[in-house]
C-alpha cells in the first residue's frame, strides 16, 4: 500500500459556461481519488496479504513501521460511517448497519449483568501465553457499554477460536495486535488477514434481552461498528482492529501500550475509528514483556508468542 504524501492534492478550476457536465464529473472524480487522508505516524488495520475478508478491505503485505490508512474514495469520508446515538440498543445498532438479527426464544444460558451500569458484574477474560513470553493477563470486558463487540469476543473465546493463535504484530510504544486465525502459523504470509467464518452467529449477552437476540456476522465474517461509548484508546485497553471502512472488524483486536487518542472513533483528527471494548486489570507486566520482544520487518515477534487459551470468567 502506497504511503500517503503530506502534499495537498491539486485543485481543478473549471471555467466557462460551455464546460460539459461529463468533464466536471471526471475532474471531480480524479480529485477525490487523489485526496489522501492526513499522514499518521501509526494506524491499526487488519494487515497481511492482499486477500480480502471484508468488503473493500485495503491491506498490505509489506507494511513499514511508519504507515497510514489509504481509504478508497467510496469510504474515505467519515460521514459515511453509521451514526448511532450513545445508549442505543445493540439490536438497533446491528439493524442500522444492515446485519441480520433474530430472537431465538428464552436464553438458556444465564445472562451476564453489568457492574458499571446495572449493579452486576462485567465478565473478564484470562489470557495464557507461551513461547517468547510466558504468563497470564486478565481483562475486563465492557459488556455493559459495548454489548455487540464484547459478545462477539466472548462467543469466539468460548468456542476456542483464539486458542493457538500467535501475536502477529507487535510495535513498541504503540500496541500488540492479535486474533487472526491464519496466525496459528506464525510464519504464514496471510497472518493479519483472517477472521471468523461468514454468516456465523453470536448471541448478545445483555441485561433485558432475555429473549436471546442473535447477530449473524456478514459475508466477510465482520460485525457492526459499535460507535457508542466514548472509551479512549488508553494504555492497557482492548480495541477492535479494522481497515477504516465501515463494519470491517471481526476477530482481530489490539492492546494499546500507550495512549493512542487519535485512534478513538470520536476523535476527528484522523480517519481511524477503533472502539474500545475492554481493559487489562492484571498482568500488565506480561503485556510490557510482549511489547519489548524483538520483531522482524513485518513487526512479528522473532520468537513466536502463542495464545494457549482464552478463558471467559463471568
Image: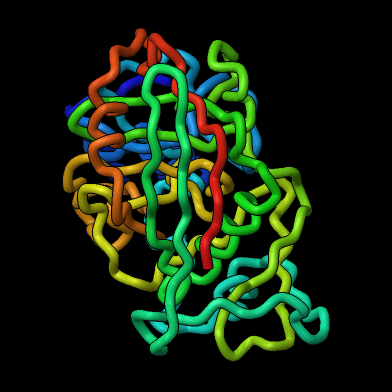
Residue drawn at (30%, 35%) of the image: 286
Q: Relative to 77, does residue 147 appear above or below in the rendering?
A: below
Q: 182 or 307: which is nearer to us?
A: 307
Q: Relative to 286, does residue 65 appear above or below in the rendering?
A: above
Q: 177 or 43: which is nearer to us?
A: 177
The percent position of residue 293, horizontal first and vertical second, equals 29, 18
Q: 109 or 252: which is nearer to us?
A: 109
Figure quadrant of the N terminus: top left
The percent position of residue 227, horizontal first and vertical second, equals 41, 67
Q: Relative to 46, does residue 198 appear above or below in the rendering?
A: below
Residue drawn at (60%, 50%) of the image: 157
In-image side of 164 versus 27 (left or right): right
Q: Quadrant of residue 279?
A: bottom left
In-image side of 312 versus 17 (left or right): right
Q: Is residue 20 visible?
A: no
Residue drawn at (39%, 17%) of the image: 132
Spot the residue most to the front.
135
Q: Relative to 128, does residue 212 appear above or below in the rendering?
A: below
Q: Is residue 111 visible?
A: yes
In-image side of 268 versus 311 (left or right): left
The percent position of residue 141, horizontal first and vertical second, equals 43, 62
Residue drawn at (31%, 27%) of the image: 290
The percent position of residue 246, horizontal first and vertical second, equals 51, 54
Amino acid at each position: 500500500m502506497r504511503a500517503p504524501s503530506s502534499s495537498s492534492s491539486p485543485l481543478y478550476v473549471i471555467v466557462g459556461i460551455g464546460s460539459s457536465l461529463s468533464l466536471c464529473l471526471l475532474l471531480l472524480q480524479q480529485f477525490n481519488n487523489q485526496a489522501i487522508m492526513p499522514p499518521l505516524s501509526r494506524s491499526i488495520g487488519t494487515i497481511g496479504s492482499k486477500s480480502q475478508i471484508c468488503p473493500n478491505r485495503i491491506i498490505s503485505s509489506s507494511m513499514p513501521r511508519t504507515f497510514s490508512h489509504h481509504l478508497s474514495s467510496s469510504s474515505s469520508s467519515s460521514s459515511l460511517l453509521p451514526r448511532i446515538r450513545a445508549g442505543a440498543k445493540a439490536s438497533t445498532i446491528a439493524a442500522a448497519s444492515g446485519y441480520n438479527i433474530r430472537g431465538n426464544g428464552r436464553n438458556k444460558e444465564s445472562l451476564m449483568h453489568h457492574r458499571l451500569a446495572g449493579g452486576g458484574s462485567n465478565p473478564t477474560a484470562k489470557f495464557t501465553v507461551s513461547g517468547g513470553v510466558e504468563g497470564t493477563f486478565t481483562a475486563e470486558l465492557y459488556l455493559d457499554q459495548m454489548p455487540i463487540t464484547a459478545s462477539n469476543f466472548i462467543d469466539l473465546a468460548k468456542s476456542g477460536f483464539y486458542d493457538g493463535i500467535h501475536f502477529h504484530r507487535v510495535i513498541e510504544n504503540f500496541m500488540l495486535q492479535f486474533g487472526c486465525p491464519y496466525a496459528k502459523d506464525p510464519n504464514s504470509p496471510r497472518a493479519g488477514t483472517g477472521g471468523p467464518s461468514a454468516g456465523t452467529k453470536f448471541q448478545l449477552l445483555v441485561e433485558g434481552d432475555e429473549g436471546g437476540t442473535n447477530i449473524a456476522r456478514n459475508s466477510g465474517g465482520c460485525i457492526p461498528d459499535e460507535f457508542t461509548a466514548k472509551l479512549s484508546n488508553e494504555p492497557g485497553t482492548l480495541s477492535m482492529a479494522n481497515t477504516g471502512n465501515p463494519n470491517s472488524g471481526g476477530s482481530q483486536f489490539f492492546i494499546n501500550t500507550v495512549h493512542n487518542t487519535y485512534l478513538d472513533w470520536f476523535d476527528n483528527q484522523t480517519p481511524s475509528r477503533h472502539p474500545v471494548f475492554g481493559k487489562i486489570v492484571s498482568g500488565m507486566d506480561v503485556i510490557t514483556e510482549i511489547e519489548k520482544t524483538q520483531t522482524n520487518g513485518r513487526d512479528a515477534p522473532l520468537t513466536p508468542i502463542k495464545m494457549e487459551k482464552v478463558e471467559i470468567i463471568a
